[in-house]
């Protein structure tokens, strides 16, 4: 015997109330789209041409960046043979995007152990470029140059390397050498695994930086690019650059985070500082 079926009436809202709710929802959506947060989300969700996606470091390289978690246990047992320099240099160290100079303190201490003088860039966290920051950096560079009476070696990690290159273009007389470490100075600014985070945090597109700059143009001083095939953030070709975009490119075997502590990076930097004239 068939079971009786019961139908329940679904209550219906009055048409004016539905219309009012729809209008309020549309207004809320418009208000959201006008916010800075919505713009940042839209920038982070932009599509990337397939050829640039293909050039980015693969998942295995990205996972390799987790080695940085072991660094606190490895560092106390690490012994570095650092010889005293016969050619002491004044060095300004520029941190990578969204990092503080403290991240590069270990590297700075090794350079100082050899007899070089290192200085922070003086701007705290690196939250991206703007004209005000560059004016402050230019003043900082000019002050170091004048105080110590010698051109300054700029060592920049990742985005910090792009800052270093542009600084050298603006004040070449104050710069002895530029050394970039995993810095995307060549190719597409989207051929990396950090551009979406950069656009969300800064609220600007990597294709339209807030300062006038030709990132690929070589500074008018000696420029050396350190790059690694194991870099899990920046495409190696972008970090190495083309022949006309730097004087020399040196291949290493470290991760992107490893540029701040890997022994081979430290020894390479010491060799470059020793050869600086």
Image: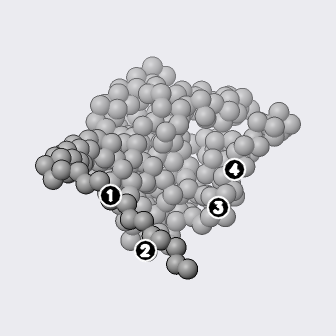
Residue at the (81%, 37%) spot, across then down: 73
Structural distance between the alpha carbons of marks 4 and 1: 54 Å
The residue located at (55%, 53%) in the rendering is 182
Q: CA distance from mark 3 to mark 2?
A: 19 Å
Q: Earlier in the sequence, mark 4 or mark 1?
A: 1
Residue 61 is tagged as 3
- Tell me the element at label 2: helix
The residue identified by callout 2 is 50
Q: Residue furthest right?
A: 77
Between 40 and 204, which is closer to the camera in this rendering? 40
Q: How far across and down, in percent of the image, does residue 195 sit?
A: 43, 54
In this rendered view, identify the residue nearer to me: 276 or 131: 131
Q: Which residue is mark 4?
A: 66
Q: Residue at x 18, y 47 (%)?
A: 17
* Residue sitting farthest toward the left: 16
Q: Quadrant of residue 230?
A: bottom right
Q: N-terminal of the two: label 1 or label 2? A: 1
What's the CA distance linking mark 3 and mark 1?
A: 56 Å
Residue, x 52% and y 78% (percent of image)? 2
Q: Nearer the viewer, mark 4 or mark 1?
A: 1
Distance, label 4 to label 3, CA atoms, is: 10 Å
- In this rendering, the answer to whether 223 lies above or below 90 is below
Pointer 3 with pointer 2, Cβ within 8 A? no
- Tell me if mark 2 has few (under 14), some (14-19) or many (20+) residues whose alpha carbon lies within 10 angstroms of its own: few
Q: What colour scheme has been applied to the protein in the rendered image?
A: one colour
Cα separation, mark 1 vs mark 2, equals: 49 Å
Q: Nearer the viewer, mark 1 or mark 2?
A: 1
Tag 1, which secondary structure?
A: loop
The disc placed on residue 10 is 1
């Amino acid at each position: 015997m068939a079971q009786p079926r019961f139908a329940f009436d679904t209550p219906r809202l009055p048409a004016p109330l539905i219309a009012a709710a729809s209008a309020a929802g549309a207004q809320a959506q418009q208000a959201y789209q006008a916010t800075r947060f919505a713009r940042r989300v839209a920038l982070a969700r932009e599509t990337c041409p397939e050829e640039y996606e293909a050039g980015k470091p693969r998942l295995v390289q990205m996972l390799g960046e987790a080695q940085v978690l072991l660094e606190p246990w490895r560092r106390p047992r690490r012994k570095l043979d650092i010889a005293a320099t016969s050619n002491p240099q004044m060095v300004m160290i520029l941190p990578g995007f969204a990092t503080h100079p403290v991240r590069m303190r270990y590297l700075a201490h090794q350079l100082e152990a050899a007899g070089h003088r290192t200085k922070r860039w003086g701007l705290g966290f690196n939250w991206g470029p703007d004209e005000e920051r560059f004016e402050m950096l230019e003043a900082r560079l000019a002050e170091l140059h004048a105080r110590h009476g010698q051109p300054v070696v700029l060592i920049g990690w990742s985005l910090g390397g792009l800052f270093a290159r542009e600084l050298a273009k603006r004040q070449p007389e104050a710069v002895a050498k530029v050394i970039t470490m995993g810095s995307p100075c060549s190719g597409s600014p989207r051929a990396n695994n950090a551009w979406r985070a950069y656009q969300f945090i800064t609220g600007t597109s990597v294709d339209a930086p807030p300062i006038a700059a030709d990132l690929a143009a070589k500074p008018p001083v000696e420029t050396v690019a350190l790059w690694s095939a194991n870099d899990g953030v920046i495409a190696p070709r972008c970090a190495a650059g083309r022949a006309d975009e730097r004087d020399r490119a040196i291949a290493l075997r470290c991760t992107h985070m490893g540029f701040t502590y890997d022994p081979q990076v430290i020894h390479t930097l010491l060799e470059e500082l020793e050869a600086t004239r």
